[in-house]
Image (cartoon, coloured by chain):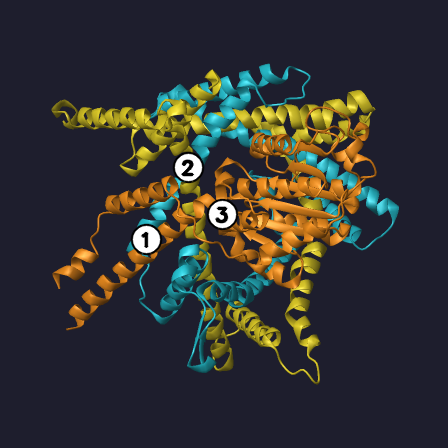
Chain colours: A cyan, B orange, C yellow
């Protein structure tokens, strides 16, 4: 059983990983066909994997309803709204599809339900970011001060008000000049920020390569899921 | 100093109320401050301006309703521009929950411009697979999207004549709220299939894309509501993004004021503690 | 005004304000809205999986174009679902091994090319534009700053050697570049969050207009009254005991 549960999957991972990497360097029509085929397989299998995520969430809430756990009423709301949405969607598209949402009740649920709810949920963060900025953003150290100054420059430079109150100016025959808060924030973003981000990007890329190699060589096995083997 | 302590003890609900009142005030009564256009947004505009009529423009709306306020105005502005330039427009999304939004945006922009589905533009809709979709589109577009969103075979649409893969796209913009987004379109798309690529992202992601902008891997970048407002300014057409910039100014000023107040109180109490 | 749009405006305004009650404290209105969102979101995803995954990507190509070869990945996809059955969950490993293995292999050369080689090239390319006669411009000055920043930040992240002497100095410079970058990111994050709020308020203002019969205002009053009633109910002596 160990062969089927461990050896075979790890072998498949290794072989597919090596082929996937080599494909990039082989400009042969068969190599391109392999890439097309694997990408297509990935799309279909990935589509089935979406079902896993959905089912897992349903399972959690169904458990709460069954056990009458605290807050099970809300889980019932979740289930009811899910079932209604599915029913309305299938009614709109029919069994054979396609589902064109415009003008249907499904679109109504999406526009006036999901867009409103999801949009509002994330917009609440605006209030908390203001509160957090007030409470936690302190110039305790030199580094924190630099962070604070950079944040302030970018916040002012990216809005019209900042550009109005701190426009470009020259004085003393050009000896003293200020490019304007807008161009200053552009420079911070395009030069200083870009430099640090480039290093972060290179570092992350090296990390991705390391992780990919670990997966291909079977050192990293988390993607296989749990179990004794 | 008692005032220093008071500065540090502003109730968070007062802060919430200030944020709400300021935002509402300037949403109701925008002032109309002028918006300076940054070079990275102008690059996108200029590139579209230079595209000959009939060029293929692919717009991927890789976002969901959570990012609608930032990215939808960009989408509308880009579609208006592309339709005005008589480009052949393909629209799609890699995010499943963004499908309805993408459809609504493209159909209303097309209706406004008098454009017809299948003739002037195509809405491909959503297909699963994230980066695998990009790879498949690069190899064979018709196999990836055999039909458009409305169920019409791709090969039968006049607009799709001559478009076999991403290699036939002249310009592509990804409006991305995360992953998959602009980086995925570069790594799996432009890097191999050699189309020009621009990016529009939420402000959260914008700072991280400047390295790609600087190397020319993307030819332009629109960041957040400001990016959309700048594009609207270039089009000479005030829209949702421009209208929101005054409220943006006010809230930024409030945040800076709160940071200053917090630090004033902190420094004063620290000095008092040392004294 | 169409009935659908009117009803939608009232629903959207009510749900929006229910969610905003979280700013006061966690309460049944917010919880209701939160769970409604999860349900609608899952329902929407299920519907799109049916039409865009099952029908568009599998059933229609097989039935209409004779793409019987797609049955193979479909079988693999079914193997993924074996995760639900603990006794045969191991079967799903084969499908995951296939896509994760290929994905890991495919990403490596692309990442090396896109995010390492081209980024390094981009760091040095401005120096190739130095002209003997022209001297230095802002382009080259900025390029020096970028080069210093990239190298210094990379030094900071190099934890395999001890940060002493010149390495420590470089890492310190790197930290300051990182602080500037994080400050810029914070500034942009504030912008992002405020934009979302502006968007929602824009919708609330629109729904509060006379064409929607002041939906936002009426719903605001109802939600505030509801919240007050809930708070009062919560604080009655029997509940407090």
Which label sits on residue B231? Answer: none
Horizontal side, residue B252 vs residue B119: left or right: left
Q: Residues within 10 Å of mark 1 (few under 14, many from 20)?
A: some
Residue ID for mark 2: C202
In percent of width and height, residue C15 lies at: 38, 27
Instruction: Say above or below: C94 vs B15.
Output: above
* Number of marks present in the image shown: 3
Which chain does tag 2 point to? C
Q: Distance between the residues labelled 2 and 1?
A: 19 Å
Residue ID for mark 1: B254
Which chain does tag 1 point to? B
Q: How far apart are marks 1 and 3 (CA)?
A: 18 Å
Farthest bottom residue? C133
Please name the residue shown 83% across and 42% down the image. Answer: A33
What element does badge 2 sit on?
Answer: helix
Residue ID for mark 3: B225
Residue nearest the viewer, comparing B30 with B228: B30
């Amino acid at each position: 059983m160990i062969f089927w549960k461990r050896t075979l999957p790890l072998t498949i991972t290794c072989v597919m990983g090596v082929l996937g990497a080599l494909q990039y360097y082989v400009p042969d029509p068969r190599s391109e066909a392999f890439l097309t085929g694997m990408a297509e397989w990935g799309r279909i299998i990935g589509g089935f994997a979406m079902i896993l995520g959905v089912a897992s969430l349903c399972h959690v809430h169904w458990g709460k309803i069954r056990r009458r756990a605290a807050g099970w009423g809300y889980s019932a709301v979740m289930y009811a709204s899910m079932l209604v949405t599915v029913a309305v969607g299938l009614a709109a598209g029919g069994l054979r599809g396609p589902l064109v949402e415009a003008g249907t009740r499904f679109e109504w649920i999406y526009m006036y339900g999901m867009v409103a709810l999801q949009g509002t949920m994330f917009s609440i963060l605006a209030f908390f970011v203001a509160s957090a900025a007030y409470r936690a953003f302190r110039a305790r150290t030199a580094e924190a001060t630099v962070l604070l100054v950079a944040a302030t420059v970018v916040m002012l430079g990216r809005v019209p008000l900042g550009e109005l109150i701190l426009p470009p100016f020259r004085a003393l025959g050009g000896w003293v000049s200020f490019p304007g808060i807008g161009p200053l924030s552009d420079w911070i973003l395009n030069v200083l920020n870009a430099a640090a981000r480039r290093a972060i990007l290179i570092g992350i890329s090296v990390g991705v390569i390391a992780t990919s190699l670990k997966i291909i060589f079977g050192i990293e096995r988390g993607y296989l899921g749990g179990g004794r083997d | 100093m008692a005032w220093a302590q008071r500065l540090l003890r502003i109730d968070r609900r007062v802060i919430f109320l200030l944020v709400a009142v300021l935002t509402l005030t300037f949403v109701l009564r925008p002032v109309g401050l002028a918006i300076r256009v940054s070079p990275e947004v102008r690059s996108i505009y200029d590139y579209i301006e230079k595209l000959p009529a009939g060029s293929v423009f692919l717009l991927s709306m890789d976002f969901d309703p959570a990012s609608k306020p930032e990215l939808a105005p960009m989408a509308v502005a880009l579609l208006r521009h592309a339709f005005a330039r008589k480009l052949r427009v393909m629209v799609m999304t890699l995010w499943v929950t963004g499908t309805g939004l993408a459809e609504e945006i493209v159909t209303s922009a097309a209706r406004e411009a008098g454009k017809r589905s299948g003739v002037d533009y195509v809405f491909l809709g959503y297909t699963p697979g994230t980066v695998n979709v990009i790879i498949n589109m690069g190899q064979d577009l018709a196999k990836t999207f055999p039909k458009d969103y409305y169920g019409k075979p791709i090969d039968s649409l006049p607009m799709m004549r001559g478009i076999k893969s991403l290699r036939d796209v002249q310009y592509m913009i990804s409006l991305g709220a995360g992953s998959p987004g602009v980086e995925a379109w570069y790594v799996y798309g432009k890097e191999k299939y050699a189309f020009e690529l621009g990016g529009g992202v939420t402000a959260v992601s914008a700072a991280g894309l400047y390295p790609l902008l600087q190397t020319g891997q993307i030819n332009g970048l629109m960041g957040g509501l400001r990016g959309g407002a700048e594009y609207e300014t270039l089009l000479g057409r005030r829209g949702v993004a421009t209208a929101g910039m005054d409220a943006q100014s006010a809230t930024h000023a409030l945040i800076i004021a709160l940071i200053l107040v917090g630090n004033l109180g902190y420094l004063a109490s620290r000095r008092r503690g040392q004294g | 005004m169409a009935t659908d749009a009117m009803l939608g405006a009232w629903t959207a305004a009510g749900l929006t304000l229910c969610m905003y009650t979280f700013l006061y404290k966690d309460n049944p209105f917010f919880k209701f809205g939160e769970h409604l969102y999860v349900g609608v979101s899952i329902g929407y995803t299920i519907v799109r999986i049916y039409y865009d995954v099952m029908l568009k990507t599998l059933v229609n190509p097989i039935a209409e174009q004779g793409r019987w070869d797609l049955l193979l990945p479909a079988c693999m996809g079914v193997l993924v679902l074996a995760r639900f059955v603990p006794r045969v969950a191991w079967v799903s490993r084969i499908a995951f091994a296939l896509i994760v293995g290929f994905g890991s292999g495919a990403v490596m050369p692309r990442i090396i090319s896109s995010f390492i080689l081209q980024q390094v090239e981009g760091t040095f390319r401005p120096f190739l534009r130095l002209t003997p006669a022209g001297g230095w411009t802002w382009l080259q000055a900025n390029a020096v700053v970028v080069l210093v920043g990239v190298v210094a930040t990379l030094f900071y992240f190099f934890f395999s050697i001890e940060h002493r002497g010149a390495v420590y100095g470089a890492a310190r410079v790197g930290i300051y570049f990182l602080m500037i970058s994080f400050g810029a990111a914070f500034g942009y994050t504030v912008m992002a969050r405020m934009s979302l709020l502006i968007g929602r308020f824009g919708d609330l203002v629109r729904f509060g207009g006379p064409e929607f019969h002041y939906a936002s205002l009426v719903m605001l009053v109802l939600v505030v009254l509801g919240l007050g009633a809930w708070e009062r109910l919560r604080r009655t002596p029997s509940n407090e005991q």
